[in-house]
Image (spheres, grey):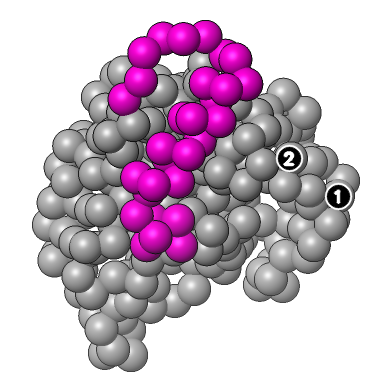
Amino acid sequence: MISRQQNDDQSAPPRVPEGRRVYAIGDIHGRDDLVRRLHRRIGEDAAQATNGADGDELAKVVVYLGDYIDRGPGSCEVVDLLLDTPLQGFEAVHLKGNHEEFLLRFWEDGSLVEAWLSNGGLDTLRSYGVEFLDLGLSGDFLAEVRRRLRQALPPRHLDFFQSLARWHVEGDYLFVHAGLRPGVPLDQQKDQDLFWIRHEFLNSGADFGRVVVHGHTISPEGDMAPNRIGIDTGAYYSGRLTCLVLEGATRRFIHT
């Protein structure tokens, strides 16, 4: 079990640390238009924040749950936006999703390419200006696509993808892209589960030690259970990008 840092009263509701407001954003999938819209709404929301009980300014944190790329038309634009126009006055945490893993595996050794291209990778390649004829998945064709991607991907984008975090903790909440393997300590969780797990995690009633905030699996309005909160609302086709706002023991949503 993952150790939980909580008050002695185990029945107390989960909380983020005092003096902090956390905004967690679900799977973006190449919808830079929705990120811009959601950033504006988050900025307006944060502007209404009052100082903490000690009079200090409230610290604001934004956690992105991964899957910045693929499926939508603006993968390159999403990364540019996050690097060039981040939310001012916010600590930003960028987590890694399985779609970033797709890209990095293709970049590094050419693996997982069929799964990537059939799950939105073609949209990312086009976003970076990698155009090609439909020649099929021959070895020569894939080698050429990989060569073109290596030429087209800006070094700072590669740095961004390679620096993404596996998880993040804020008080009684743990943020991760897909979920956790039940019964496995956090420091022993495998990337395969952190980035890809579904049913074993979603169907589990296990106490993970913290409430797990995750994306990866789509639900129209968000999916709230006692041990987890899913906030992937299928932005790339629904137009609904979701942000979970946590402060003290409160929870609420902001949507596009």
Which circle, 2 or 1, is nearer the viewer?
Answer: 2
Q: Percent position (x, y) of residue 169?
A: 58, 64
Residue 47 picture quarter: bottom left
Judging by the rendered image, the residue that carries numbered circle 1 is: 184
Predominant SS of the magenta segment: helix
Please, is residue 48 above or below residue 157 in the view?
below
| Callout 2: SS | helix
The disc, 2 or 1, on the residue closer to the chain's N-terminal end is: 1
Please, is residue 156 above or below residue 251 in the view?
below
Magenta-colored span: 131-160
Disc 1 marks a residue whose amino acid type is Val
Q: Percent position (x, y) of residue 137?
A: 57, 14
Residue 134 picture quarter: top left
Q: Tell me the quarter of the image containing the C terminus.
A: top left
Judging by the rendered image, the residue that carries numbered circle 2 is: 193
Disc 2 marks a residue whose amino acid type is Asp
Q: What residue do we see at 25% from left, 53% from top?
A: 80
The mark tally for this picture is: 2
Q: In the image, is 148 to the left or to the right of 212?
A: left
| Callout 1: SS | loop
Mark 2 surroundings: few (<14), some (14-19) or many (≥20) residues within 10 A: some
Callout 2 touching callout 1 (CB < 8 Å): yes
Mark 2 and mark 1: Cα distance apart in space: 10 Å
Q: What residue do we see at 34% from left, 31% from top?
A: 130
